Amino acid sequence: MELHLALRNIVKTDGPSIITEGRLVNILCDFQAFDAIPASKYVMRAIIDDGYSKKLLQCTKWDMAAQQLSGQFASSTGFQPDIVWTIFQSLAYGLGWKNTIEKCSVKNPTVPPMHPHRAKVKLGNNASVNDINQYFSSIVELKNDSLSSFGVQFTNISCVWDRSFKDKDFYYYCNVEVTGKLKEFMCIKVISYGFDNSIIDVSSTYVDSNTHKSFGVYNVNPHIQGYMPSDIAKIIVYAE
């Protein structure tokens, strides 16, 4: 069931205050409400843990003050604004404050800020492969302005953890979909950050304008040594 529809059903059963309770995440998992946007599970958990769902409930309606909470939360945590906007809208829908879900019109920041605060959503030591993949998907962001001179767009970015790893020595795969006619030779870079804003790894792959067609999927394979998947706080993807 879609997230906003699941929230409407849950609020009808458990009351509006359910959006402030941690158990909401587990209930939504039972509804498979996070399947369309897997990263939304971690974002929803952070919204509740950080008290933003309580702030939203106190607004009593989907007015400017309620809508601004989405931007405040995205800025303070570094989560992707489009995912955050969708979740806040879904919460408002669940509360009966609105009857439609609008597409996000907020662009991701050029270089998202790093915040130690994001440690609240770090992975546990016994996280499953699916949890790790969802977590990586929630922390990857694109540096938009890096594409302006190449004539292409990154239409989808996904990160998948390689399960065949040793402790503190692993790979993950960053798959980047590139759409459009490439004007010149391009390097796709992937930077992995720690929770202290330190750079853990910089990896890259090259795309040749002579061989790239109108669409292609390119893979970058960061090799992380000395860290666990739970030590990665942010993944930045850009072109140069």
Image: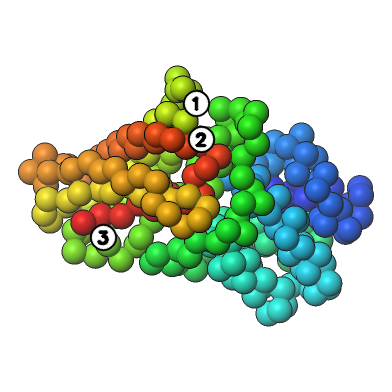
- Viewer-side residue, 6 vs 156: 156
Write down the residue under mark 2.
Answer: 228
Spot occupied by residue 190 in the image (x, y as percentages of width and height)? 33, 47
Tag 3 secondary structure: helix
Single out the residue that lies furthest toward the bottom.
Answer: 64
For the residues labelled 1 and 3, say whether their Cβ atoms are less than 8 Å apart. Answer: no
Q: Which residue position holds label 3?
A: 147
Residue 92 falls in which quadrant of the image? Answer: bottom right
Left or right of 201? Residue 138 is right
Asked if the residues shown at circle 3 and circle 2 are in contact, with their CB atoms under 8 angstroms apart, the answer is no
Q: Select label 1 or label 3 by which is in front.
A: 1
Residue linked to disc 1: 167
Q: What residue type is labelled 3?
A: Leu
- The amino acid beneath tag 1 is Asp
Q: Are marks 2 and 1 in contact (CB under 8 Å)?
A: yes
- Residue lying farthest to the left in this orientation: 210
Q: Residue at x 75, y 55 (%)?
A: 49
Instruction: For label 2, count other residues whose C-alpha is less than 10 Å away and answer few (under 14), some (14-19) or many (20+).
Output: some
The answer to which of marks 2 and 1 sits earlier in the sequence is: 1
In x, y percent, where is residue 60?
Answer: 83, 73
Q: Which of 8 and 23 is in front in this view?
A: 23
Q: How far apart are marks 1 and 3 (CA)?
A: 36 Å
The reply to whether residue 109 is visible in this rendering is yes
Type of amino acid under label 2: Met
